[in-house]
Image (tube, helix red, strand yellow):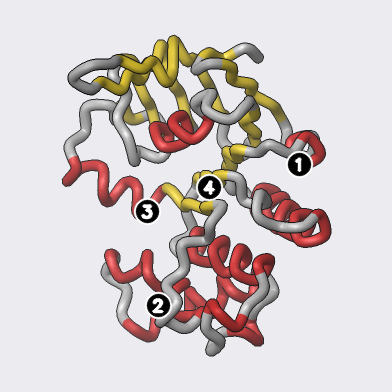
């Protein structure tokens, strides 16, 4: 489902060059749940952004579902990212002025769904994360764990085949973190391929496979 070959990412300014990722080779099979770990600044989020087509590699090959995408332009990337990929962020990125259900509908605005279809899909996604009774609430009325569940619902509303999660339990206590990992495991059991960045060994142990990075290099 995801294949990276000899991927390198270099950030350059007028005075300095920073090697963020070096010679990354990675295969993630369809239906896998993979975790990425490593110290802060080792390139975990950079790797996730490259897999999610939010950033481009300086060198190397990226395949998503058999398609080489590293040279795709923005017009080619946008529909692929919208239909195949769902993103979950540590800091939720909810819009405070929109209700829960309106936040969840946002990815569908870039598709051909009409208003009725968008609402039905958003309701279904919120049911899956156990927030059907919070649809009309606003983010400020929710706990951290509830906000993260809304963010998961938004990520899955378009039924993507791949879910990319960047520290999804990082801002939560252990009880809420376990709720979130339970939801991710359920989504995985229902066919989603998941790549998750985490600092938490206990969360990583609940995934199928662990990838470790150190100073931008894959060490496991």
Tell me, for residue 118, which label it has, or none. Answer: 2
Q: Earlier in the sequence, mark 3 or mark 1?
A: 3
The structure residue drawn at horizontal position 73% and vertical position 52%, both measured from the top left corner, is: 181
Q: In this view, does 162 lie above or below 61?
A: below
Give the residue at mark 3. 83
The structure residue drawn at horizontal position 76% and vertical position 41%, both measured from the top left corner, is: 203
10 Å neighbourhood of mark 4: few (<14), some, or many (≥20)? Answer: many
CB within 8 Å, label 4 to label 2 = no
Disc 4 from disc 2: Cα separation: 20 Å
CB within 8 Å, label 3 to label 4 = no
The structure residue drawn at horizontal position 62% and vertical position 84%, both measured from the top left corner, is: 134
Tell me, for residue 203, which label it has, or none. Answer: 1
Disc 3 from disc 1: Cα separation: 27 Å
Label 3 secondary element: helix
Q: Left or right of 69: which side holds 125? A: right
Number of callouts: 4
Label 2 secondary element: helix
Q: Position of residue 190 (x, y in %)?
A: 66, 53
Label 4 secondary element: strand
Disc 2 from disc 1: Cα separation: 32 Å
Q: Quadrant of the C terminus?
A: top right
């Amino acid at each position: 489902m995801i294949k990276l070959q000899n991927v390198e990412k270099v950030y350059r300014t007028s005075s300095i060059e920073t090697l963020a990722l070096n010679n990354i080779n990675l295969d993630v099979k369809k239906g896998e749940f993979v975790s990425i770990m490593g110290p802060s600044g080792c390139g975990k989020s950079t790797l996730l952004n490259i897999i999610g087509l939010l950033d481009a590699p300086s060198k190397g090959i990226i395949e998503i579902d058999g398609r080489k995408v590293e040279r795709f332009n923005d017009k080619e990337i946008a529909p692929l990212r919208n239909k195949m990929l769902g993103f979950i962020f540590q800091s939720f990125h909810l819009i405070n002025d929109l209700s829960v259900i309106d936040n969840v509908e946002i990815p569908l605005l870039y598709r051909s769904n009409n208003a009725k279809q968008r609402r039905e899909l958003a309701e279904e996604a919120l049911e899956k994360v156990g927030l059907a009774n919070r649809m009309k609430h606003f983010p400020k009325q929710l706990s951290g764990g509830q906000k993260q569940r809304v963010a998961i619902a938004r990520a899955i509303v378009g039924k993507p085949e791949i879910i990319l999660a960047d520290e999804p339990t990082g801002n939560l206590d252990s009880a809420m973190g376990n709720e979130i990992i339970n939801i991710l495991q359920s989504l995985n059991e229902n066919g989603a391929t998941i790549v998750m960045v985490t600092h938490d060994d206990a969360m990583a142990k609940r995934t199928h496979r662990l990838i470790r990075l150190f100073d931008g290099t894959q060490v496991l």
